[in-house]
Amino acid sequence: MDILIDTNILVGSIQIESALHSEAIHALLVLRDRGGRVCVVPQNVYEFWAVATRPIENNGLGMTPRQAHDLAGRIESLYKLLRDPPDLCDEWRRLVVNYGVSGKKTHDARLVAAMAVHGIKQILTFNTADFGGIGALHPSSFA
């Protein structure tokens, strides 16, 4: 079984001082031990980079681009990177029009579109409400 991980899981898994760290790591380890393929898409890498290089005082990690590059490479080696297929934009547009998605939620809709085109049924996220009934799993469900 494939599962997509949301960017907040990636960020939580590397922020050792975060209250979400142990929960993210535990869920990822359980998924790995169950033999599931834990996946990321390019959007996860872009979003991770944005958070990683944003100043700490702006809710970022305060990393240099070199540090973010090194961690992005680690992410891509730990998890299966599913490349964006040509029809991803069409699927995203279908979703945002059919469901009236606007504003910040368009980013999550793009993850849902990626799930659809790659045949993934679940996403691991701390923000399950953002994904409605789209197979969103919270890391606490692996406790």
Image (cartoon, rainbow, N blue to C red):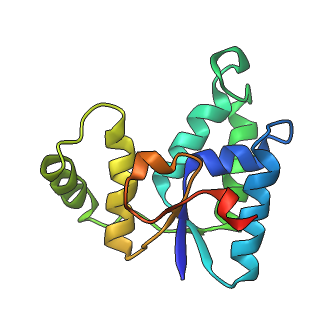
Q: Quadrant of residue 19?
A: top right
Q: Position of residue 86 (x, y in %)?
A: 26, 65
Horizontal side, residue 29 vs residue 88: left or right = right
Residue at left offset 20%, top offset 47%: 96
Residue at left offset 53%, top offset 50%: 44
Q: Quadrant of residue 115?
A: bottom left
Report how many numbered discs are placed on residues in the image.
0
* Foreground residue among 132 and 94: 132
Residue at left offset 65%, top offset 29%: 53
Q: Is residue 57 above or below residue 70?
A: above
Q: Is residue 40 visible?
A: no
The N terminus appears in which quarter of the rendering?
bottom right
Q: Position of residue 106 (x, y in %)?
A: 31, 41
Residue at left offset 75%, top offset 44%: 20
Q: Position of residue 3 (x, y in %)?
A: 54, 71
Horizontal side, residue 17 vs residue 70: left or right = right
The C terminus appears in which quarter of the rendering?
bottom right
Q: Position of residue 123 (x, y in %)?
A: 50, 62
Q: Is residue 124 visible?
A: yes
Horizontal side, residue 79 vs residue 102: left or right = right
Horizontal side, residue 37 vs residue 13: left or right = left
* Residue found at the far right of this picture: 17
